[in-house]
Amino acid sequence: MKLAVINGSPRGRDSNSSRIAGWITSSLEGSVEVCHAYVFNIARYDELMAKIGGCDYYLFIFPLYTDSMPGLSKAFMEKMEEHKPLFSGKNIAFIIHSGFPESSQSLTVERYTRYFASLLGMNCTGTIKMGGSEIIRSAPDSFFKDKVAAFQKIAKNIERSEPFDAKALEIIGSRKRHGAFFNFIFKHIDIGGIYWNRILRKNKAYKSRFDRPYLND
Amino acid sequence: MIAGRKWNQLCGKHMNVTIINGTPGDGWDEFENHLDKAAGTLSADHRVDFFTLRDMNINYCRGCFSCWVKTPGLCVFRDDMDIILDKYVRSDFLIFAGPLKTGFLPALTKKAMDRIIPVALPYIRLFDGECHHPRRYENQPVLGLLLFDDSPGAEAVDIAFSTIDRLALNLHPERTFKFIVTAEKIEEVLIHEIGGNQRLSKG
Ligand SMILES: Cc1cc2nc3c(=O)[nH]c(=O)nc-3n(C[C@H](O)[C@H](O)[C@H](O)COP(=O)(O)O)c2cc1C
């Protein structure tokens, strides 16, 4: 089988999407040939279509950007529609991951992934939603042990072109809308604040964190 | 301020309106002509800034987060998005107009939407059990979507509408409006939503 991994992150190789892709491709059997495409290569889209057109299975991974796919991922999808005959009748799966911890953030664009697949006459084998992805790049795999193991299971599903393991999906997208406990913790500890302020301080930008450059106030 | 805005709308007072036309290319002349005409009509009472994205130089966001952690509020790219954001922070209405492409907002529109994040703060607050960002600027325009109707599937329209609703959870506009319109209806819908003397004079 030839698998095309479409990296939908504008960050390209140095992205959380790349890390997630690696969790899957590293556990594929040798019989699966992997072909990589990066959506940031906008000048090379025609070339990329020719490159991935011969694949049997497509895995499209993208981060949530302003509540849907990044503009570059959408540009790539539009290109795929232009070349619809290359993709019709084939399998496609999606991984949508978001900075925010809840997988519920991605529900709307998940609907679009299914719409897109049907528009291209493709068979959507599944759409995986995962929250809290922004920290992946700055942490070792051991930090995400359960999720890595779940993605290894997904890799097996892809190999066999079968539906995704329900338990693996549950582990990957476990955090949905928060309940009372998280609400309580969140009220008392500003986790996001600690994270961003540390980076702002490192960049010597902490003082200007509330700047409004377009108003010059 | 909210009450003031409603009052202004009722009285047909002056509004700042930013219209972002994301029509990707040819073939939508009738819609674009009507959109142009509607912008002209609205200009009689309001300040209207009309942008056609395909004629502008806007880079795709590359996800570096400089606009949050290095130069707060400012993207690394100095391009035409500066002109839009400069209006955005003073607008009462921000309206995305255009057709669907490949069953969703065109990449052109999505590109501009991604580049809005400098107006949000990186910080995270919990709203209804979900994380969202607080705003950087006090002012937050009413968020509108005007889809050109060439009979796209109901599912595609609904997905686009709910994307705007989700975006609103992070941008915190006072309200949103979403319409799918034929070319002839564009002016009517915009006047109805924005208000103005034209509406009063027409009864
Ligand atoms: C322009 C922009 C918009 C984003 N919008 C959202 C969003 O609406 N919801 C969310 O949960 N995360 C959002 N994020 C966070 C990304 O999804 C997150 O950082 C992700 O891990 C990036 O993955 P990547 O390294 O593969 O690009 C946004 C990031 C950027 C740069």
Image (cartoon, rainbow, N blue to C red):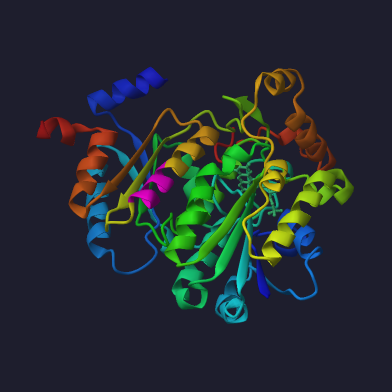
Tell me, yes or no, if residue B56 can be seen here. no
Q: Is residue A45 left or right of residue B156?
A: right
Residue B181: horizontal and vertical position, in percent?
A: 25, 49
- Of helix, strand and loop, which mostly describes the magenta segment? helix
Is residue B157 shown in magenta?
yes
Q: Residue at x 36, y 40 (%)?
A: B17
Q: Between B157 and A29, which is closer to the camera in this rendering?
A: A29
Q: Between A41 and A33, which is closer to the camera in this rendering?
A: A33
Q: Is residue A76 left or right of residue B7?
A: right
On screen, A59 above or below B145? below
Res. B91 image quadrant: top left
How many labels, in total? 0
Q: Residue at x 38, y 57 (%)?
A: B100
Is residue A6 shown in magenta?
no
Res. B103 image quadrant: bottom left
Residue A59: horizontal and vertical position, in percent?
A: 63, 63
Quarter in which the C terminus of chain A is drawn: top right
Tell me, yes or no, if residue A35 can be seen here. yes
Q: Residue at x 22, y 61 (%)?
A: B30
Q: Is residue A128 left or right of residue B180?
A: right
Quarter in which the N terminus of chain A is drawn: bottom right
Residue B154: horizontal and vertical position, in percent?
A: 33, 49
**Span of residues in magenta:** B154-161
Residue B67: horizontal and vertical position, in percent?
A: 66, 45
